[in-house]
Image (cartoon, rainbow, N blue to C red):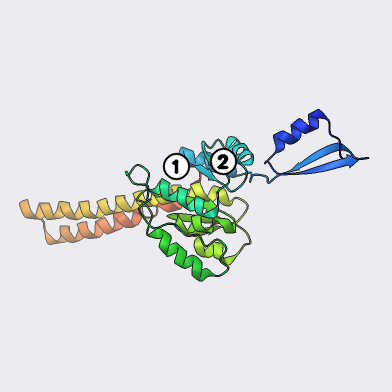
Amino acid sequence: NISMTETMEATLAAWTGSGSVVFVTIDEEVAGMILMADALRPESKPCVQRLKDLGIEAALLSGDAEVAVKRVAEILEIQAAHSKLLPEAKATLLREASWADTGRNGSSTRTLKASASASTSTPLLLHQQQEQQVRGPRVVGFLGDGLNDCPALAFAHIGIAVQEVGPQSIVDASTAVLLGGDALLKVPAAVVVARRTQMLILVNLLLAIGCNTAIIVGAAFVGVPLWLSVLADSGSLLLVLANSFWPLCWGGAGNPSQ
């Protein structure tokens, strides 16, 4: 038997579920303990904070033990944290989130079937097509980096894989794959760019429709020369073209305040 002090026993109890514990013994007595646990990416907390600043709700879905998940959720300041989840359970939670605030939870639809253990792309692509049929109207996204995240990546409206090297099945199940040391920070940056692009398209439509509508109304009630109609039509196209150069000035898109 290996003897331990009460302090070490209390420490060991506190570490339960947080990772793997390595004991250092001398003459069958524990001289020390080393906790080996996965470290968070340094950009994880800034990514979550920026998403919150953009009005996006963040949740933590993990298959790890409850203690480890709670510890990570506290560091990242995430309120909704779920532990001990199987791949199918992650997809189920995403389905419930996509039907939130609609009066439905998707329970009447077909039962979700996971293909996390598939080694080829065909089953995952089939699984992806099946999952898309039970998505709710609320847009949900999922970030994952493991094979057990494939069902959730396939179900989400936007599935983002964060990996340098991994199985091809993860890529097949994802909408996008982010690479690089600051991959997580690209997520809020992409949200900002997408929203600005949506606004840019709306402004361009209003410019084009507004100019032509003004000319039509003027021609109907006042009478507009032909040359002025041509000038207005060409002018609206030039305005739309000039406004489309705004993305060149979108520096610091990853910062919601800019």
Residues at marks 2 and 1, CA–CA distance in whole angstroms: 14 Å
Q: Amino acid at mark 2?
A: Pro
Disc marking residue 183? none
Q: Residue at x 71, y 37 (%)?
A: 15
Along the viewing direction, whichever of 183 and 70 lies nearer the viewer: 70
Q: Nearer the viewer, residue 193 or 71?
A: 71
Residue at 86% in and 35% down: 3
Q: Which residue is mark 1?
A: 56
- Circle 1 packing at 10 Å, graded few (<14), some (14-19), many (20+), is some
Q: Mark 2 falls on what kind of element?
A: helix
85 relative to 138 in the view: left or right: right
* Figure check: 256 above or below 107: above
Q: Is residue 107 above or below residue 113?
A: above
Circle 1 sits in a helix, a strand or a loop, which is it?
loop
Of tags 2 and 1, the one toward the viewer is 1
| Residue 209 vertical position relative to residue 29 in the rendered view, above or below | below
The type of residue carrying mark 1 is: Ile
Task: Determine the residue positioned at 68% across, 46% down.
Answer: 38
Q: 208 or 224, which lies in front? A: 208
Residue 163 visible in the picture: yes
Toward which corner of the image does residue 119 lie, by quadrant? bottom right
Residue 84 appears at what percent x and percent y? 58, 46
Residue, disc 2: 46
Nearest the eye: 62 or 207: 62
Q: Position of residue 128 (x, y in %)?
A: 45, 62
